[in-house]
């Protein structure tokens, strides 16, 4: 859901995202973005904007997943939630760490949004690794 922000609200949101999600070259947060933006190309503002976009995704994705799943899972009964948890576990078994793979779906039926966020994060990590590998010389 989009909303119109005042300049002050947008500035505050941007600084907040930088503070919690920006990974700079030398440090983290707003100060890191400031230092990185002052660098000459190929770094500079382009790097800051790219990293800030990644930060926005990192902050907003869990909110979005929870919002979507609240609407979908809300009307479901316990047995249906268990089936959803079972499906998530089965389809993402290779990506999930040991303790999650040992859980019975009924243990995760009330934690489906968190499970989905974990799965999404693992898929992101896998994409980053495969992307990095593809840049290695043959």
Image (cartoon, helix red, strand yellow):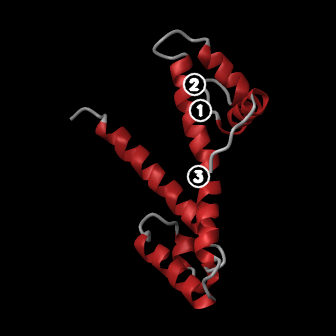
Q: Nearer the viewer, mark 2 or mark 3?
A: 3
Residue depicted at x 46% and y 78%: 87
Closer to us: 24 or 54: 54
Say if residue 104 shows up in the picture: no
Q: Quadrant of the C terminus?
A: top left
Where residue 112 appears, as percent x and y from the top left, is: 60, 72
What's the CA distance linking mark 3 and mark 1?
14 Å
Say which element carries label 3: helix
- Which mark is drawn over residue 48? 2
Where residue 13 appears, as percent x and y from the top left, is: 73, 36
Say if residue 48 shows up in the picture: yes
The residue that label 1 is drawn on is 52
Closer to us: 12 or 89: 12
**102 to the left or right of 32:** left
Q: Which tag, 3 or 1, sits closer to the chain's start?
A: 1
Residue depicted at x 57% and y 60%: 117
Residue depicted at x 59% and y 64%: 68
Say which element carries label 2: helix
Q: Is residue 62 above or below residue 136?
A: below
What's the CA distance linking mark 2 and mark 3?
20 Å
The residue that label 3 is drawn on is 61
- Say few, some or many: other residues with alpha carbon within 10 Å of mark 1 (under 14 / 14 to 19 / 20 or more): many
């Amino acid at each position: 859901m989009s909303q119109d922000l005042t300049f002050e609200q947008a500035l505050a949101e941007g600084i907040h995202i930088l503070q919690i999600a920006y990974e700079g070259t030398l440090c983290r947060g707003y100060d890191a973005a400031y230092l990185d933006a002052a660098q000459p190309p190929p770094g500079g503002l382009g790097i800051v904007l790219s990293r800030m976009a990644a930060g926005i995704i990192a902050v907003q994705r869990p909110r979005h997943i929870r919002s979507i799943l609240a609407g979908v899972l809300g009307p479901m009964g316990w047995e249906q939630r268990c089936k959803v948890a079972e499906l998530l576990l089965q389809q993402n078994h290779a990506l999930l760490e040991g303790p999650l793979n040992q859980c019975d779906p009924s243990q995760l039926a009330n934690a489906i949004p968190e499970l989905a966020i974990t799965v999404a994060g693992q898929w992101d990590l896998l994409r980053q690794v495969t992307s990095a590998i593809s840049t290695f010389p043959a």
